[in-house]
Amino acid sequence: MNGTLELENVVTGFGIRKKVYKITKRSFDVLMAMLGVIVMIPIILVIKTSYLLSGDKKSIFYKQIRIGKDGKKFELFKFRSMVWNADEILKELLKEKKYKEEWDRYQKINNDPRITKVGNLLRKTSLDELPQMINILKGDMSLIGPRPLIEGELDEHHGNHEIYEKVRPGLTSWWAANGRSNIEYEDRLALEYYYVNHMSFLLDIKCIIRTVKVVFKKSGAK
């Protein structure tokens, strides 16, 4: 009898801690996203001016459909770091074997010819991801979680939807904090699964600290 009560107390305590963690995590997300949007305003002006000076009058924002929690689709925001018709150019690039092999392996291309001069700086500093603060405010994303993937990407790499899509995708992730583009896709998924299965205040703090280090060192930024 006592053993049953103790087990019930443990389960109840775990449930309460889980709820507190979720509420605190979301509150922190909203607070940081609000600050991020404020910081983003002067950066928008600088980026827009830089593009205009280079003769590029297209929008400085890039929107793409990604897959979020429970497989729900949402529109992800980024600062545009490539030429405006990058998706069409990618289709042509992937007809070449060297680009196709690299894309299949990393979902990125080293020295991507589509990236603009302004965009290269944005990527090196990870500022291109800043507009995702809007996605966090909307509830599509979290500050920390598996990076949001495009439709079909997880299936292409034989990923696990049940684990990957169990939580909101993140602005940064355990993968991004541990090497980013220097890591092959199978290992990337393993890192994302690890975060989902071990989510905690401590792991989130570790992720933030490692992400800051990676960004300042510009490790794996492409």
Image (cartoon, rainbow, N blue to C red):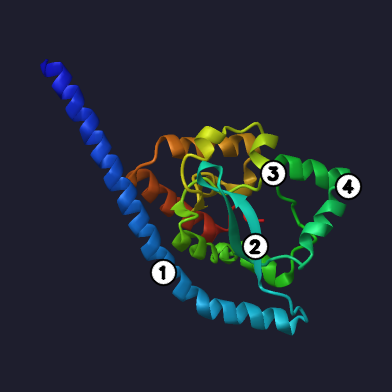
Closer mark to the observer between disc 4 and disc 3: 4
Cα distance, mark 3 to mark 2? 21 Å
Snapshot quadrant of residue 53: bottom right
Taking the spot 50% from the left edge, 34% from the top edge, the residue there is 163
Residue 184 seen in the figure: no
Q: Residue furthest top?
A: 1
What number is the disc on residue 63? 2
Residue ID for mark 1: 34
Closer mark to the observer between disc 1 and disc 3: 1
Residue ID for mark 4: 95
Task: Rate crowding at label 4 as few (under 14), some (14 to 19) or many (20 or more) other CA atoms within 10 Å.
Answer: few
Q: Is residue 206 left or right of residue 100?
A: left
Q: Is residue 58 left or right of residue 176?
A: right
Which x, y percent locates residue 154? 64, 38
Closer mark to the observer between disc 4 and disc 2: 2
Which x, y percent locates residue 114? 78, 62
SS category of the residue bearing label 4: loop
Give the quarter of the figure containing the N terminus.
top left
Residue 208 seen in the figure: yes
Along the line of sight, the residue nearer the viewer: 168 or 114: 168
Give the quarter of the figure containing the C terminus.
bottom right
Residue ID for mark 3: 106
- Amino acid type of the residue that numbered disc 1 sits on in the rendered structure: Met
Task: Rate crowding at label 3 as few (under 14), some (14 to 19) or many (20 or more) other CA atoms within 10 Å.
Answer: some
Cα distance, mark 4 to mark 2? 24 Å
